[in-house]
Image (spheres, coloured by chain):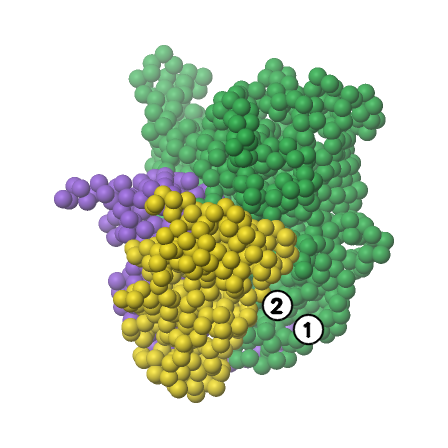
Chain colours: A green, B purple, C yellow
Amino acid sequence: MALDEIKIGGMGASRRRVEDNRFIRGKGNYVDDIVLPGMLHMEILRSNVAHARIKSIDTSAAWEIPGVRLVLTGEMMAARNLAWMPTLSYDTQAVLATDKVRFQGQEVAAVIADDPYIAKDACSKIVVEYEQLPAVVNPFEAQDPSAPLIRDDKENQPTNKIFDWEIGDKERTDQAFAEADVVSKIDLHYPRSHPSPLEPCGSIADYDRATGKLTVFMTSQAPHIVRAAVAMVAELPEHQIRIVSPDLGGGFGNKVPIYPGYVISILASILTERPVKWIEDKTGNLISTGFGRDVYLRGELALRKDGRILGMRMHTVSDHGAFFADAQPTKFKIGLMHSTFACYEVPAAHLTSEGYYTTKAPGGVAYRCSFRVTEAMFFQERMMHAAANDLGMDQAEFRRLNLVKDDMFPYRTAFGFLTDSGQYGKCLDIGLEAIGYSTFKQEQEEARKRGKLLGIGISTMTEPLGAGNSREYDIIGIKMFDSAELRVHMTGKAILRTGAKTQGQGHETTWAQIVAHELGIPAEDIVVEEGDTDTAPFGMGTYASRSTPVAGAAVAMVARKIRAKARKIAAHLLEVSEEDIEWELGRFYVRGNQERGVTIQDCALAAYSNVPDGLEPGLENNAYYDPPNLTWPFAAYICKVEVDAETGVWDVLKFVAVDDCGVRINPMIVEGQIMGGLTEAYAMANMQYITFDEEGNCIGSNYMDYLLPTAWETPGFELHEVVTPCPHHPIGAKGVGECATVGGPAAFVNAVMNAIEHTGVRNVDMPMMPNRVYEALQTGEDVSGMPPMKVE
Amino acid sequence: MSSLYDEVAPTPGADVPVRRVTIDVNGQKRTVDVEPRLLLAHLLRQGLALTGTHTGCDTTSCGACTVLFDGRPAKSCTMFAVQADGHAVETVEGMGSASGLHPVQEGFKEEHGLQCGFCTPGMMLTAKALLERNPDPTEDEVRWALSGNLCRCTGYQNIVNAVLWAAKKMRDEQTQEA
Amino acid sequence: MYPSRFSYESPKTVQEAISLLDRSGGEAKILAGGQSLIPMLKLRFASPEMLVDINGIPGLDYLRVDPDGTLRIGALCRHEDLEFSTTLANTHPTLAAAADLVADPIVRTRGTFVGSVCHADPQGDWAATMVALGGKIVAQGPQGRREIDVRDFVLGPFANALAYNEIAVEAVIPGAKGTARGGYLKLERRVGDFATASVAVALDMAGATVSHAGCALAGVGGRTIDANEAISVLQGKPLTAENIEAAAEAVAAVAEPRTDHRGSADYKRHIVKTFVTRLLTNIAKSEQKAA
């Protein structure tokens, strides 16, 4: 008899998480929990100014503190050719500053000592003499001919511009605008944000001179990429490098790049021949590591009177900080910004982008985002909102009219993406019904008569998740496939390893469910391991919602290879030919005689004890999966707010999320991902941003200034589900981890705008803090969030 | 990369005044010598190898380091270990027993109240203290009580559900006993 | 974040603590709740040579009301003791309204009322309520005890009037003459945020008439703003919309806000006016209900 898939924890089971067993007992194993014998501790001295020439660094007093083992400066790194390292965007980044500091918080020196308290004491004794230079805190300042040249270390870098990039069809787009009845425009800043996992970054480097082996425990979402990069930077042989990413206290893209601290700790371990632990403090994390966004988004829509979109133009100006360290596919300078408007029928589109250096922290990471998709969808939905208003059309109606229809798939977007599946209109309708859209306008009018400001905001979007196919997607040349390796032991228990790296997504639980679905081995009989480059197969790691689309597919594929071999064994055990074998969950049987069969466990035992002639013993395999396309989940997010006209404070009255992420492996975990993503969307819309004053001082350098919402402010979310299986994914799944963060912000912002736009205001930049909303209400004018912040 | 050892300073003879303290940690008396500036969180993590107490921020904002100090939640990164002398500290490792989990721990697993697990110990201890004072809290009371603990993964809704789940279980157990 | 070295003393009596402070010659700091001090030590904004931990001194954790209505708060009374007090809402509604807006629930289990006033943060909640209520701080030093009006006690940002060898042992807050009414409103972007602007209002009502009015502001100046004189326009008057408006304008006029990332000076002043209006209107409504 076939097994009950839910009972064995297969696909569709809201299986309780395996990893919870250790986390709820305080037995997680995060980098800072690891203690190695003889371990030393490292602290980093950071620049307190944004832009300055280093005149001198005096470390003598630091060396004198008892317990100090090593003090490193840029000069000493340079002597080993390690003062600079390559970034993930083919630029260079200072490991320890030699010539200048280029942002506040840049790494200037490091102390290695017996304990971190002593290392900190010693850091405070280092005297750095700076000659201050003007700060540059937005890309428009950077464009100014009088702006200081930030990257004077580079040849052929006469200005602060990093790149010009474009995609799309300019001519056709110009034509569309020439034919338009209405042209609608918008001008936005998506502010700098920080993923800010609760656990900051850190590493323990352990170099063993006797064996020549370097082991690094570190907070990495992509340990294999790190291994490759360390091999290149430190010129160590790759087989002598072991990167271990243990439990991660969140990542959200922040733990993708390679940071100076990792590199310094590695050199420190080589020099001291002791393990060296570096654990960043929260301020270090917020002011120096990979931020998200910081892009100016301008664009326009060419519209016909009846509401159809004829064409779209977009121009982005992005602020990359002092080093171009974006973690993104090589081919696309501004990530997948051109995925904008992918869910709408847009006949012609053109995108131009320019990127600039500023004296701010580097590392534009995909913060819970597939490479600038968050900015792309925010622009799209703010643009749609403005256009509907300009046309005098209903927001929902305008979207419904332009959404790609179910029968149009596969659909080629104006920028060349191929969307392959979805029920966009259905998702929107479910959301509208749930929020009570049909009666809202009346409710809004009545409320306004009583002095209450209500607003509703819609955001519908599809986004490209699961980079990628290797034709188009690589990071520093490494193709973006992923992998899985499965070993079934003789008792039918199994171990699965993948090249992904869980950081809260629950891979240990869901990967086992995929195997259970494919093989009928109960999920609880499968242990999942990730993150150790010595044992895990090569993979590109977990970010950009790519785990299920890529590594998850590899899991299904390797399980199918195992099943194919088990089928041969089953034929042998049942003494029939392979063609006469049928499969049902967990069991092979003889066609026409369902009673006569063997379980997958029987086959596993036979693989080690009774192998047919000509077949290799054992039951293990691996699979590398190169996806044929991205996956395209769709979401409709609808938010209803009330704005307090006297203070500008707004409250979420209701939030409805309709997600179609294809087949759900573990519905409980999927919903957890969506709620988490919506909370980050709410945070960015409401309070979470990093800004700078005119001297380049970072405002948002700790949790007193960089505000993250608590359980009290965070609204409740009502979730709905639509399932359109992905046509090319082996189990029909699509990415989901970031959908809510990508599509969510526009729903909140559109809702607040809807409540206040009767004053004539078209845009308030995020975060929509009470003072900004109030200002817009008073003046009816747009409120810009471009730094520098006004400070008296 | 060789011949650079001259840059490595010699081992110091550390001569740092310490104080002897005795702390009841999870029901066990622990006597240790600590430097006065040692934070309680660091004593628990490094000195006593109770690494379930996490340090997330430095500004008393995130609550990942929350322990129960004489039964009340306290941020152990904002107390010195010397201050715990003669007091009782409960960490996540002290929740539940060898034979079973505390209902709050069960609730977090049942309701998917955690993802990366980093905030979880602090959240659970705060929740435990809440339920000791208020066995039947409303959703708003739970949200208010947890508002000194930050979570980046879950969006809180499932954490709130987890605490309400535990509250119900604890009340049911009480009813059964009575 | 790791603090610098200090020596640590845990005296068992106030006298002992005072003599430790006296001997330190100004290089010591009192450690009570530590919820502001310890973060400052960790960030190395402060590096005292000695910490005098008063948590082991018995008898300082009280919150009590004298027969004449005077409220006395001992140096080790924690924020949450006020939050969970069952009587405070009747005797001192201003304090009750502020109690659960101070920091966050966990900080409130450790942080102390008196310590918070001593910290003299311009954005501090308790100092504002003290100023509105006409509270005093009792300082004890080698020469004995003295009472300091809170307006003379909070000198500026993070500066108070204590001599280096004095300890603030108690806060004294007079009871209302008549019916105590009051409230506290704070614009914070999330729990634990510092006030963008906040307003404490404390009224003594004689029937429908305001017999005494107190008011203070936090977050809108380089120190706690004393708005007692401004709100005294209400003295002897009923809480009519007109009087409320006049009071709100007068109070907003004494705010000294600065433009920063929390908002413009004008916005913060507007919030002060709005909050004063809301607080007084709420009181007027509840008076009407009571009558």
Q: Residue at x 63, y 75 (%)?
A: A126
The residue lying at 68 percent from left, 38 percent from top is A780
Residue B124 image point, x, y percent: 36, 50
Q: Chain of mark 1?
A: A
Where does label 1 land, which residue?
A128
Residue C108 in sight: yes
In front of the other: A352 or A656? A656
Closer to the camera, A530 or A677?
A677
* Of the image marks 2 and 1, the number of the one nearer the N terminus: 2
Q: Amino acid at mark 1?
A: Val
Q: Is residue C261 left or right of residue A528?
A: right
Please name the residue that numbered disc 2 is placed on.
A45
Is label 2 in contact with label 1 (beta carbons under 8 Å)? yes
Q: Quadrant of residue A155?
A: bottom right
Quadrant in the picture for the N terminus of chain A = top left
- C272 lies above or below A640: below
Q: Quadrant of residue A168?
A: top right
